[in-house]
Image (tube, grey):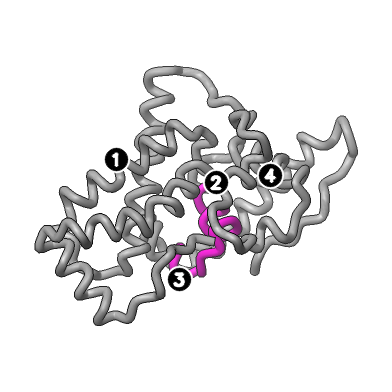
Amino acid sequence: MLQTSAIALSEEEERCRIAQLQAGSEEAFDRLIAEYAPPLYRLAYRLLNDPADADDVVQEVFLKVFCSIGQFQGNCPLKAWLCRITVNTVANQNRWWRRHRKQERPLDAPETGGCPLDFLADDNAQSPFQSLVSRETQELVQSALLRLSEPSRVILVLREMEDLSYEEVSEILHISLGTVKSRLARARQSLKGEMETMLEPAQGGVPEWSPAD
């Protein structure tokens, strides 16, 4: 779940925070980074499957925030804006890799002493994704995710792994609720198909996994 260490802000409190950021408050930027760097890193890692690339993305995200906060109109929640910048930065990085490296990214996670989602967990509460599936299935899902198209991977990570609401996903991706639901349904089917393909030689079936509604 995309959680932060801060208590949820009211609309008035968020407007005050944005005003402080736009006024150039170093304290406000430091607090923003402290609260959002860990969950944005986790989001970037789940989309890229590389810790160094995810770290680069987060640094670039906050640089973009610093440069563009003055133009932020507050027409969406600050969290949604930050997630949108992160998703777009990941997309730009993926395009750079395809253009300059001309090769597929590895499917195996870096050696971190555990499965990829264990490495990413930086809070005490398990996400619905983590509590529903076994470690082996988590690893399988992470590998299958990387085989999907970028739009499918993004919407599954935001909804299923970060446990964002349909409304939040709609804000982040700038698409309607109906498009969120239809794209998510197709992405789930694609993921299931990839998992079946990966498991067929070994098990002939897919572990039970019921995605969030």
* Residue 194 numbered tag: none
Residue at x-position 31% and y-position 65%: 78
Element class at badge 1: helix
Per the image, the residue denoted by label 3 is 167
Query: Camera-side residue: 74 or 125?
Result: 125
Quarter of the image holding residue 149?
top right
Q: Of discs 1 and 4, which sits in the foreground?
A: 1
Going from N to C along the chain, the mark reached first, 1 or 4, is: 1
- Tell me the number on the disc at residue 153: 2
The residues colored magenta run: 154-169
Are the residues flagged by discs 4 and 2 in contact, CB closer than 8 Å?
Answer: no
Name the residue that disc number 1 marks. 60
Image marks 1 and 2: residues in contact by CB distance under 8 Å: no
Q: Do the residues labelled 3 and 4 touch (CB within 8 Å)?
A: no
Q: Residues within 10 Å of mark 1 (few under 14, many from 20)?
A: some
Q: Mark 4 points at which residue?
A: 141
